[in-house]
Image (spheres, grey):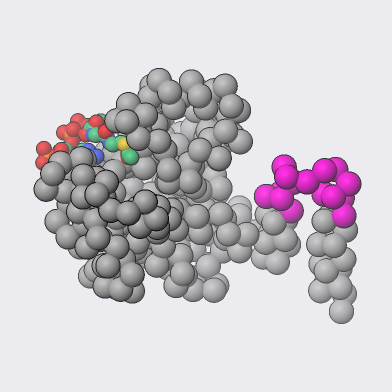
């Protein structure tokens, strides 16, 4: 794990070349205003490692300014089977350690390592972008949390969300607990996490985990159409509106009204200089 920290501070954290991403099992395509991140290790059901999270963080840091929409998807039958289970073995993931080596490190070091992993997920909420998860098949643990890190989830009818962490003696720590509670409410979040049960498409739609459910073969086109809709609005207004919406829950009605006035005054001045 110490090795992982060292590598994340230097080494691969700096490199988001196509070659390096391919080694990690990721693909990044930027086409004008759209960036597509593909988890690309289908033979291992897109299991994620510390290198995945470090690379995701670096993609966020280096995202070209023109990008407005980020699509996150998984190659193959599953969106992602979560953390690479080799982390639970004594050998761990080559070059990245294991949970048993992590357990031996100082408290603050371990939290710092988790914080670096979380950085791979946090940037997907930035107001400057809208992130869309295209989710088919299994989205387990870190896979579920990656989908939760996105603003919108469009899912295939075979989707299977599962917050497996508590079953493995862990908590969900990849920034997924807050969006889960905000989307489905506390009771349902407790039900989903503390039973580690699977949430299928119908329920995902009903409880607000998914914005849209489509047959598997239509997922790509549906996401494509949603991206086109998202790009059809004014960019600056979209950024300001997302900022407003994100802050709404934490503000009183009066505070939110004041925030609306501030944003709108800036918009009107920009539109009618
Ligand atoms: N880590 C490492 N390898 C994995 C993982 C994983 N999380 N998930 C699947 N694989 C590998 C399998 O070992 C197998 O490899 P092999 O072909 O070399 O034997 C390959 O991916 C295919 O896996 P199958 O189980 O054969 O695929 P299937 O489609 O039948 O099942 C499923 C998919 C349900 C996702 C199953 O693989 C599974 O349950 N995986 C483990 C899920 C898990 O517990 N993740 C941890 C969650 S907790 C967290 O993320 C913090």
Task: Report the number of numbered marks.
Answer: 0
**Left or right for 251, reference 37:** right
Q: Residue at x 46, y 69 (%)?
A: 61
Q: Is residue 87 magenta?
A: no
- What x and y, as percent, mark residue 259? 82, 56
Which quadrant does ligand 1 occupy? Answer: top left
Please tell me in which quadrant of the rendered image residue 21 appears. Answer: bottom left
Task: Work out whether 187 lies above or below 81.
Answer: above
**Left or right for 96, reference 9:** left
Please tell me in which quadrant of the rendered image residue 171 appears. Answer: top left
Quadrant assignment for the C terminus? bottom right
Task: Work out whether 40 lies above or below 180.
Answer: below
Q: Residue at x 24, y 60 (%)?
A: 2
Viewer-nearest residue: 162 or 43:
162
**Left or right for 200, reference 94:** right
Q: Is residue 248 magenta?
A: yes
Residue 160 seen in this snapshot: no
Q: Residue furthest left?
A: 91
Q: Residue furthest bottom?
A: 273
Task: Work out whether 61 lies above or below 202.
Answer: below
- What x and y, as percent, mark residue 76? 26, 43
Residue 189 seen in this snapshot: yes
Quadrant assignment for the N terminus? bottom left
**Left or right for 247, reference 140:** right
- What x and y, as percent, mark residue 255? 85, 50
Q: Main secondary structure of the magenta part?
A: helix
- What x and y, as percent, mark residue 202? 48, 23
Q: Which residues are magenta?
A: 244-258
Q: Residue at x 56, y 54 (%)?
A: 125
Q: Residue at x 81, y 67 (%)?
A: 267
């Amino acid at each position: 794990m110490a090795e992982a920290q060292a590598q994340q501070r230097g080494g691969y954290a700096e490199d988001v070349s196509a070659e390096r991403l391919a080694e990690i099992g990721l693909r990044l395509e930027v086409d004008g205003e759209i960036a597509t991140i593909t988890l690309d290790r289908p033979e291992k059901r897109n299991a994620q490692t510390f290198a995945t999270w470090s690379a995701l963080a670096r993609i966020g840091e280096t995202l070209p300014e023109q990008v407005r929409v980020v699509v996150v998807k998984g190659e193959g039958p599953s969106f992602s089977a979560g953390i690479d289970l080799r982390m639970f073995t004594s050998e761990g993931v080559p070059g990245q350690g294991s949970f048993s080596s992590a357990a031996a490190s100082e408290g603050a070091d371990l939290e710092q390592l988790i914080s670096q992993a979380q950085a791979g997920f946090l940037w997907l909420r930035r107001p400057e972008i809208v992130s869309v998860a295209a989710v088919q098949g299994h989205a387990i643990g870190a896979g579920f949390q990656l989908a939760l890190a996105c603003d919108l989830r469009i899912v295939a009818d075979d989707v299977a969300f599962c917050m497996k962490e508590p079953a493995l003696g862990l908590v969900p720590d990849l920034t997924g607990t807050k969006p889960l509670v905000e989307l489905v409410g506390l009771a349902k979040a407790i039900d989903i996490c503390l039973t580690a049960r699977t949430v299928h498409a119908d329920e995902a739609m009903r409880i607000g985990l998914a914005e849209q459910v489509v047959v598997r073969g239509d997922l790509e086109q549906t996401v494509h159409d949603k991206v086109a809709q998202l790009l059809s609005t004014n960019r600056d207004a979209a950024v300001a509106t997302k900022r407003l919406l994100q802050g709404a829950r934490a503000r009183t009605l009066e505070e939110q009204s004041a925030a609306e006035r501030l944003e709108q005054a800036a918009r009107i001045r920009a539109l009618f200089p």
